[in-house]
Image (cartoon, rainbow, N blue to C red):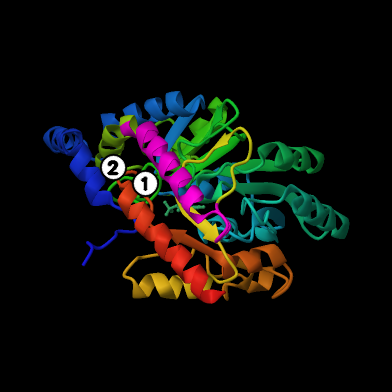
Amino acid sequence: MSPPIPFMDLKAQYARLKPEIDAAIARVLAHGQFILGPEVKELEAKIAAYTGAAHCVGVANGTDALTIALMAEGVGAGDAVFVPAFTFTATAEAVLVLGATPVFCDVDARTCNLDPVDLARRADAVAAKGRLRPRAVIAVDLFGLPADYDGIGAVAARHGLFVLSDAAQSFGARAGNRRAGAMAAVASTSFFPAKPLGGYGDGGALMTDDPARAELYRSLRAHGTGGTKYDIVRVGFNSRLDTLQAAILLAKLPALDGEIAARERLARRYDAALAGAVETPPRPAGAVSAWAQYTIQSPARDRIAQHMKAKGIPTAIYYPKPMHLQPAYAMHGGGEGSLPVSEALSRRVLSLPFHADMDDATADRVAAEVRAACAQTR
Ligand SMILES: *Cc1c(COP(=O)(O)O)cnc(C)c1O
């Protein structure tokens, strides 16, 4: 019997980085500054340098990062915020908790990222109707691949929309000479353990070139404080990044580019082995994915998933239901059929076991079973 295949392998990563991570944790336990300790500032500086954004502000998680970014712009009731229908829940949730209205847009069938043509159509419709003010758009870099920021930026400029980049899945990705985190006015990211740069708990960050926005984020993550700790100048949150998480992330950051290169190499191996059997992930010119997931598409998705399960190989479906069909958000959507590409993707996508420590033989075994499943369904 072959050994079990993990979908993702955080234990292997820990084994590889153990001395650095253990030492980083021990340092925090020794100095005891668990809240906004020196590692938080150091990580913020290192992330700013890494991404090319002038400022980074650590927060408690990627969802809060989205919420704080929108709140800082004054987004609220009466505002329309355009979001892709095919994304993780948090993208729409951040809009709704502020009392604003999400306007779900369709995505590109290949990249799974926000389609600027559909965005333009929906922004025009909202503007023409006049009930909501078009205010912002959240571009998500799904599976690690940067969204089409040029296309989205052109629509945003026409409607005066604030562009927020949800880079939760793309930390480390590149497009042209820009890094994820520096592709829009503001970017948010997540350090959830399974993300490209993951901690050992929750964490997140905001990145921007604008010093005034960065200062506002620092205030909003700490209860809306002003000059001193007990001077509250606005309503905020308790959403600081833990010192322990910052220390762990500092230990992991130097390994990130090597891990992305390893995943890129593995992705090419999967591409070659799966060509012709399923649709493999796209590679738009000039873009380098952070490869948060390796996601195939097939009309036989459910059969392939069943076959893999029978063979003891884990797979995952990101995402089985688009946002506009979620019971809690459905009142803001147009129902079944209103976002056909997102709906089709939710029936076609399947993410395969994939991580930087995976060996070629394992990848070949996974690919062979996908091919076997496809051969059976013909
Ligand atoms: C993970 C994720 C988030 C939220 O991050 P958390 O740290 O879990 O709150 C937001 N957007 C996308 C696209 C994500 O994948």
> Is any atom of residue 221 visible in this view?
yes
Name the residue nearer the viewer: 282 or 28: 282
Where residue 104 appears, as percent x and y from the top left, is 68, 60
- Closer to the N terminus: mark 1 or mark 2? 1
Q: Is residue 137 left or right of residue 15?
A: right
Where residue 372 appears, as percent x and y from the top left, is 45, 68
Q: CA distance from mark 1 to mark 2?
A: 7 Å
Label 1 Cα crowd, 10 Å radius (few <14 / some 14-19 / many 20+): many
Q: Are marks 1 and 2 in contact (CB under 8 Å)?
A: yes
Say which amino acid is labelled 1: Gly
Q: Which residues are magenta?
A: 255-280
Label 2 Cα crowd, 10 Å radius (few <14 / some 14-19 / many 20+): many
Name the residue nearer the viewer: 235 or 378: 378
Q: Residue at x 39, y 47 (%)?
A: 239
Q: Can you tell which quarter of the image residue 337 is in?
A: bottom right
Q: In terms of secondary structure, where does tag 1 sit?
A: loop
Where residue 125 appears, as percent x and y from the top left, is 84, 58
Task: Work out whether 92 lies above or below 163.
Answer: below
Where residue 295 appears, as percent x and y from the top left, is 50, 56
**Is residue 7 shown in magenta?**
no
Name the residue nearer the viewer: 375 or 47: 375
Q: In terms of secondary structure, where does tag 2 sit?
A: helix
Q: Is residue 305 left or right of residue 73?
A: left
Number of marks present in the image shown: 2
Say which residue label 2 marks. Answer: 245
- State which quarter of the image contains the C terminus: bottom right
- State which quarter of the image contains the N terminus: bottom left
Say which amino acid is labelled 2: Gln
Say which residue label 1 marks. Answer: 203
